[in-house]
Image: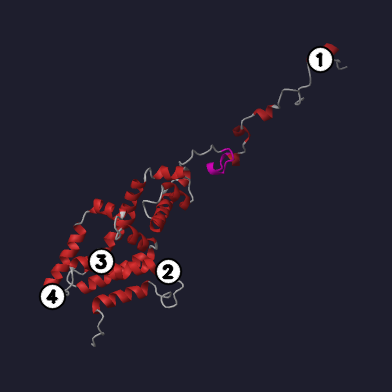
Amino acid sequence: MARIPSDDQAVKSPPKDIAGVKGRKPRAALRRPAETQTDSQADAPANLKAAAPPRRPGRPSGAARGPDQRNRLLDAALVLFARQGIVDTTLGEIAREAGFTPAMMHYYFKTRDQLLDVLIDERFAPLRAGLGVPFQENPDDPVAAITQLTRRLVQVATDHPWFPSLWVREVISDGGLLRQRMHERFGDAHQKASLSAIARWQKEGRLNAGLEPALVFVTLLGLTILPLATSKLWCNDPVRRNIGGEQIARHAVALLVQGIGPKKAG
């Protein structure tokens, strides 16, 4: 026959399955989260785990760190620089335009000067090199070179909507910061080479001797970039609202090659 515990034994040995004793939690609740994960949870990617450690402000991690975020900041900077000028644009405004926090902006670019140097190296230098290609490809045909350059300018402005306004505001305007920084970075060797080619063509009888070499590119920009920069104002103009890059390029080439006189037969 089973032995019945005495009253003293019953008091000294409480049931082991009691979990609700005051001041004591079930042992299962004291386990760390990692101990209660299933195999599938343990194998889940880090960005899907609910208990992932918080990210430090402004320091992108994992997939967030990369060229996409940096390029978005550069794109936002170009839009704001074209809209309101470089001097009047802060890094915080650029961050908000890109949808980021100022801390993330400072992670990539510490100062506006650093940002501007990156823009010159990565965005403007390739465009500048591309604009010199027509002269390289047509060393003995100035008409072809200037015609191709005209069309290329219009194409660049069409592909990069910020280009015309930014060029007018920061390159050909008095005190333009971008022009100063580009001159500091590249010097004037490219400009001198272009002027030398124009002067040579004039001596060879390939180009109108009455042209002023130093004004050729200013005239070209006035025929292309200036109309494109002001085209937004034409939306309510019934005469010019349908004029686009193709029409501007054709007009500029016709004016440069044929002048204002009637087209010659043949």
Q: Earlier in the sequence, mark 2 or mark 1?
A: 1
Asked if residue 49 is among those painted magenta in the image, a careful observer would answer yes
In the image, residue 102 lies at what x, y percent?
A: 46, 44
**Outermost front residue:** 174
The residue pinned by badge 3 equals: 218
Characterize the local packing of mark 1: few (<14), some (14-19) or many (20 or more) Cα atoms within 10 angstroms.
Answer: few
Characterize the local packing of mark 2: few (<14), some (14-19) or many (20 or more) Cα atoms within 10 angstroms.
Answer: few
The reply to whether residue 236 is in sight is yes
In the image, residue 104 lies at what x, y percent?
A: 45, 44
User: What are the residue bounds of the magenta stretch?
Assistant: 42-51
Q: Earlier in the sequence, mark 2 or mark 3?
A: 3
Q: Earlier in the sequence, mark 4 or mark 1?
A: 1
The answer for how far apart the CA atoms under marks 2 and 1 are is: 93 Å
Asked if residue 48 is among those painted magenta in the image, a careful observer would answer yes
The residue pinned by badge 4 equals: 205
The answer for how far apart the CA atoms under marks 3 and 4 are is: 22 Å
Quarter of the figure that contains the N terminus: top right
**Outermost left residue:** 203
The residue pinned by badge 1 equals: 11
Quarter of the figure that contains the C terminus: bottom left
In the image, residue 66 lies at what x, y percent?
A: 42, 48
Q: Label 4 sits on what residue type?
A: Gly
Q: Label 3 sits on what residue type?
A: Val
In the image, residue 23 lies at what x, y percent?
A: 72, 22
